[in-house]
Amino acid sequence: MLYWRRPSSTTQSVIMVVTDILYITLLLHASGGVQTGLGTLIAVSIATGSLIMPGRVALLFAALATLSVLIQQTVATISGTSASSGYPQAGMLGVAFFAIATLALVLSQRASKSEQLVTQQELDLANLEQLNDYIIQHMQTGILVVDNESRIRLINDAAWYLLGTPDVKTGKHLKHVCQPLDEQMQRWRNNRETEPDIFRPTPGGRELKPGFSPLGETGSNGTVAFIEDEASVTQQAQQMKLASLGRLTASIAHEIRNPLGAIGHAEQLLQESTQLAKGDQRLLQIIGTNTRRVNDIIENVLQLSRRNQFRPKEFMLKAWLDQFVRECLTYHNLPHSCFVVDIDPPDTLIFADSSQLRQILSNLCENSIRHFHAEKEAILISFKGGITQASGGPFLDVIDNGPGIPPEVARQIFEPFFTTNNRGTGLGLYIAKELSESNRMRLEYLPVEGGGSCFRMNFPGTRTRRRQG
């Protein structure tokens, strides 16, 4: 079977221009020759065809048109319908055809280059937009862009996570997503000299520090909000201050360890002597106690300087806590009634380094036992955990029935070498805080009404990418 195939656009254009040239030439001949001025119509077809055809086809059209006009003039001269004086005019038409074709060819090439440039620029803009989106979405700082009516135009994953994973859609008003942030932005718009305040997106949520910047010179295009976790900012500042201190204390600890070992060895040798007076034995006991205390400080400092690599994994919190409680009961020689584990839901999963989590909880439990003033068997340490409604991530509360911590002391408990116990080193809670932050957890102290202390650990939740409408 034979199928009719429609010619391409290039073929159709060539046929159209050639047909125009032939028909206008016939019309020119029938009207009396080049003297009528109808030859200029051929120039229109040449110009049109040259603009839409690629390459040097325009010169082919000019040559064909010139040849057609000359043939028409020759036929007219032979037949006697036109005088031979029409040849110069026909030649001028040919020159005009080539000039128009050349000009159209140049314009066509420029248009083609401009089109290629525009296409390349569109591709570059698309790539740049994709790169900007990738950078914005992977920034640790929260980025939120709103228009002048406070309707959300863009929000990255960090901002979505910091704001408590709200239901966000493009075009939604900011006050319906986070009213405290909207109030801060309106206050800043009224007076750009105002310093934004720290806010909590949800009750019990993390403290966030906002910053605002106008889009464009006048800010008529909207506002950009930068959102940072205040705890992270404070942590970064503290890390910078303590980095040099950590290196210094580690080197000092190494230098102290050798003479301290000699003192401890000498104390053990003196303990074996039977010729010491009771007063000297008491002094020797003081030397031994303080030597062991200094050694504990050195061990803690060196432990911070040679912290093991972070190896997180996912595991069930309740099953892990049951095993941890059994180890604590054996180590501290306590009855089973001293520990309670209450995890709801029981299948709560966490993502952390189990060995470092064990050290964190060990430090918290030892801190509770050390500051418990009644009989050791009367202490009650409760592990209560589950999923927070605000962020959707798992949490764990370590609660004891001790005397609690005064507010003026609570602000300093995570500082290194701060202690209210003469037998303590002041590094237990500091190490717990440092290990928590290395596991991307947030450890904070919460007072308990009626006495007791509560240390809350917020674990990183599963961060799924949000969907925007």
Image (cartoon, rainbow, N blue to C red):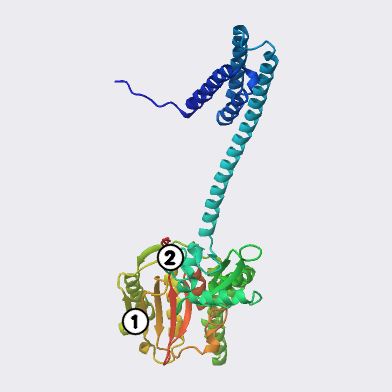
Compared to residue 434, the image places residue 467 above or below, namely above
Q: Is residue 281 visible?
A: no
Examine the image and state in which quarter residue 139 appears.
bottom right
Please state if 94 lies on the left or on the right of 5 as rendered: right
Residue at 63% of width from left, 28% of height from top?
105
Image quadrant holding the N terminus, namely top left
The mark tally for this picture is 2
- 27 or 147, nearer to the observer: 27
Examine the image and state in which quarter residue 223 appears.
bottom right
Q: Is residue 243 visible?
A: yes
The amino acid marked with disc number 1 is Phe
Residue at 64% of width from left, 68% of height from top?
244
Q: Where is residue 205 in the image (x, y as percent from the top left)?
A: 46, 76
Q: Position of residue 87 (x, y in %)?
A: 68, 13
Q: Position of residue 118 (x, y in %)?
A: 59, 42
Q: What element carries label 1?
A: strand
Compared to residue 377, the image places residue 437 above or below, namely above
Bin the neighbour count of mark 2 within 10 Å (Cα to Cα): few under 14, some 14-19, many 20 and up: some
Compared to residue 23, the image places residue 193 above or below, namely below
Please state if 121 lies on the left or on the right of 396 as rendered: right
The residue where tag 1 is placed is 339
Label disc, if present, on residue 44 of the rendered structure: none
The amino acid marked with disc number 2 is Asp
Q: How far apart are the alpha carbons under marks 1 and 2?
A: 22 Å
Q: Of marks 1 and 2, which one's residue comes earlier in the chain? A: 1
Q: What element carries label 2?
A: loop
The residue where tag 2 is placed is 353
- 60 or 417, nearer to the observer: 60
Residue at 66% of width from left, 20% of height from top?
93
